[in-house]
Image (cartoon, helix red, strand yellow):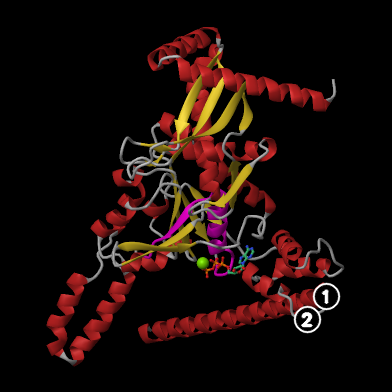
Amino acid sequence: MGAKDMFANLGSIIASLMFVWAMFQQYVPYQLQHNIEKYCQILVRFVYPYIQIRFDELSGDYDFFRSEAYTAIQTYLSSRSCTQAKKLKADIAKNSQSLALRMDDHEEVADEFQGLKLWWASGKEVSNTPSWWTPEEKRYYRLTCHKRHRELILGPYLNHVIKEGKAIEARNRQRKLYTNSDSKWSHVVLKHPATFQTLAMDPEKKKEIVEDLIAFSKAEEFYERVGRAWKRGYLLYGPPGTGKSSMIAAMANLLGYDLYDLELTSVKNNTELRKLLMEVSSKAIILIEDIDCSLDLTGQRKKKKKKKEKDEAKEKKDPKQKPEKEEKETEESKVTLSGLLNFIDGLWSACGGERLIVFTTNYVEQLDPALIRSGRMDKHIELSYCRFEAFKGLAKNYLQIESHPLFGRIRELLDEANLSPADVAEHLMPKRASGDPTVSLESLIQGLEKAKEDARLKAEEEAKKNDQAAKEEAKDQEKEVTTEE
Ligand SMILES: Nc1ncnc2c1ncn2[C@@H]1O[C@H](COP(=O)(O)OP(=O)(O)OP(=O)(O)O)[C@@H](O)[C@H]1O
Ligand SMILES: [Mg+2]
């Protein structure tokens, strides 16, 4: 039988069925129809070996809102839909940064879980009597699986679908950069291009940090089991321009976390600090840059101290200013070291979960040991001057070269001179239209030679000063001895 005959037969069968259905509806009383349908369904349920679960898009009886489960399932099915469905819908979801594809209505895709096969179908119900409180169309997903696997599907599989869907949503969503002012967070979209691939540092060290971050982000169950709040503290320290801020952006990009840049100098007191903390969402990095400048070791602000000194000097000149000074001082910030410690590991810090707290400083030796002990700052990362391994990363990134005859000379100089990755990167920026890497590398060699020479002159000057001081001390001692005699 040809395809043409087959379609002709099929057409006549469908037409006959429709005719029988129309007769059935017209001549069989409504109550009997209803009963027949009901018993048919019971019969089908008895012999049908599958179970079906329906997830509606809108939940709530009157006050409709989009179901979280439906959204998570939609995201979860998106990659399967791309490979299996014939009709797709494309859209950019709210707060998302990429195009989301999902299967169109009345499509079906298959999924597999622990060797079992399941089917997801998308459907749509159109209301015959739409009104202002019932939507015209109701969309849903229907999951079909074999009865035998009911427990596995209702428990672990559905948990897996929702968790995975939410994780994909989190990865796709636009990350935000928050900052505090007037005891409130305000935000912009975070669009920093730094990643761990573009960060130049010792590859071993970089690998260790990336693994640590990924292990943290997957360790929810571990933290729960051992009874710890799901958070981790990082201390990044090193000279200016060594990539501390870039690493934080890379962390946010790697984990898909929001970044909360906490400006301690504009927080009035500990209460305000706690309030800000409570507003931080989970999956966030709370960042306090230059911690050594924000808070001094006695728990009082350096800025405050400086201001006090200034005020005292003014007061000496003009004693009338005193009342104004006192008024201002009560207004001033009183975030203390203990307030900050509570912020990091007090009870309040555990609300929300999945947070990194990152401190940066140029002077690690000036920090209070209480602030950086394990448990508060779990991982200390030193970012140092550019050495050859880090340089190779920059050369690959900026000049797209992995070797060059000048690399030998650069390697020697990098061991002798201290240049930050920011300075090295500046030499590698495109300077000529030709884009010849030799020009950039020569410029770097000159920079390194200059840095080496400057360091030598500085060392000589220091040695001279020390010499001079030693001589003067010796003279003073001689004088003391002669006067005693
Ligand atoms: N390790 C690095 N790898 C790649 N680029 C770097 C690195 N370090 C610095 N840079 C470049 O230098 C610029 C400044 O670096 P960054 O702001 O991260 O330094 P920092 O350590 O935070 O300095 P500071 O202590 O002054 O805040 C960055 O925009 C980046 O382009
Ligand atoms: Mg910085």
Residue at left offset 63%, top offset 19%: 16
Residue 268 circle label? none
**Residue with the mark numbered 2:** 432
User: In terms of image quadrants, where is residue 68?
Assistant: top left
In terms of depth relative to the viewer, which is nearer, 466 or 213? 213
Residue at left offset 15%, top offset 87%: 321
Report the Cα–Cα distance between label 1 and label 2. 7 Å
- Quadrant of the rendering where the C terminus is positioned: bottom left
Q: Residue 295: in sight, yes or no? A: no
Mark count: 2
Tell me the element at label 2: loop
Report the magenta residues as a range: 239-263
Residue 436 circle label? 1
Query: Can you say whether 158 is above or below 243 in the image?
Result: above
Query: Relative to residue 410, is residue 25 drawn left or right?
Result: left
Q: Position of residue 200 (x, y in %)?
A: 66, 60
| Disc 1 residue type (three-letter) | Asp
User: In terms of image quadrants, where is residue 82?
Assistant: top right
In terms of depth relative to the viewer, which is nearer, 22 or 131? 22
Q: Residue 28: in sight, yes or no? A: yes
Residue at left offset 46%, top offset 31%: 55
Query: Relative to residue 409, is residue 247 drawn left or right?
Result: left
Q: Position of residue 377 (x, y in %)?
A: 44, 50
242 is within the stretch colored magenta = yes
Query: Relative to residue 328, is residue 216 drawn left or right?
Result: right
Ligand 1 falls in quadrant: bottom right
